[in-house]
Image (tube, rainbow, N blue to C red):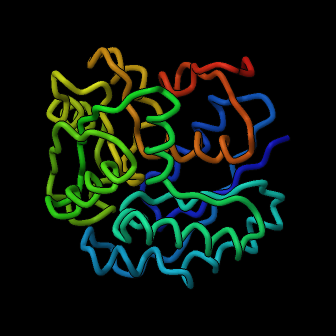
Amino acid sequence: MTALGFLYPGHSAEDDYPRIEQLLGSDIRVDLVHTDIGEDAHRVDALREMGSADRLTAGVEQLRLSGAEAVVWACTSGSFVHGWEGAHEQVRALARAAGMPASSTSFGFVHALGELGLRRVAVGATYPDDVADLFAGFLRAGGAEVVSVRSSGIVTAAEVGQWGEDEVLALARRADHESAEAVLLPDTALHTAALIQMLEKELSKPVLTANQVTVWEALRLADRRVNAPALGSLFTREPIVQV
């Protein structure tokens, strides 16, 4: 059994995680601990506080007791708002507190692009413009070429969590760019786990979504590769463990 630990802010799209666990099957266990988000706002100061060390370490002991082998801060905006170096320090502090390998969703996107051998990306963000631009800057710091950014101006994760298939598909279509090799949807408050195959078929290219890359990043830290085509191109890379 490979046990994966996640620190998830508040309650929005956490039901993506048991869905992903079911799609992975086999001997993968997904353990989720909810962190206190403070103010629910896609605003830089609120996002920085959401990802503060005190808020993250509060949930670490529960994950240790669950037997987790790796922990991922399952929040994109609460990591990239700290900048490239700040986000590294955030996960280093988390790893020290947890006593296990640690990462965040933001780094999951960067590593997933490397896994797929892709560089040119389009971003479809639920965030306001300034926050979406910070994500684009983070990706560029990680070596990606961001060819377009489309933001939706949504202020709260609670509102994003209410989006359904039609809204997610519209966001992905709006974000797509003819020169992009992949489309990225960075908000972990967005329900996407059941939609990735449909999105990739619609856009005819890989689609990376926040909760998808978060789980993939935890598997990477635990040195596991799982073939689960329902979770998109990212989960069909060699070497694989067939499920």
Relative image position of residue 177 (x, y in whole percent):
16, 28
Relative image position of residue 106 (x, y in whole percent):
44, 54
Give the residue displayed 65% in from the left and 74% down from the top: 59
Q: Using the rendered view, name the quadrant where residue 110 is placed.
A: top left
Is 200 on the left or on the right of 123, as rendered? right
Relative image position of residue 184 (x, y in whole percent):
32, 38
Give the residue displayed 46% in from the left and 67% down from the top: 87
Give the residue displayed 26% in from the left and 39% down from the top: 145
Please tell me which residue lies in front, 207 or 93: 93
Q: Using the rendered view, name the quadrant where residue 132 is placed.
A: bottom left
22 relative to 81, above or below: above
Give the residue displayed 80% in from the left and 43% down from the top: 2
Is 62 on the left or on the right of 149, as rendered? right
Is 142 on the left or on the right of 97, as rendered? left
8 relative to 48, above or below: above
Q: Quadrant of the N terminus?
A: top right
Q: Using the rendered view, name the quadrant where residue 19 is placed.
A: top right
Please tell me which residue lies in front, 235 or 13: 235
Q: Quadrant of the C terminus?
A: top right
Relative image position of residue 226 (x, y in whole percent):
68, 27
Q: Residue furthest bottom?
A: 54
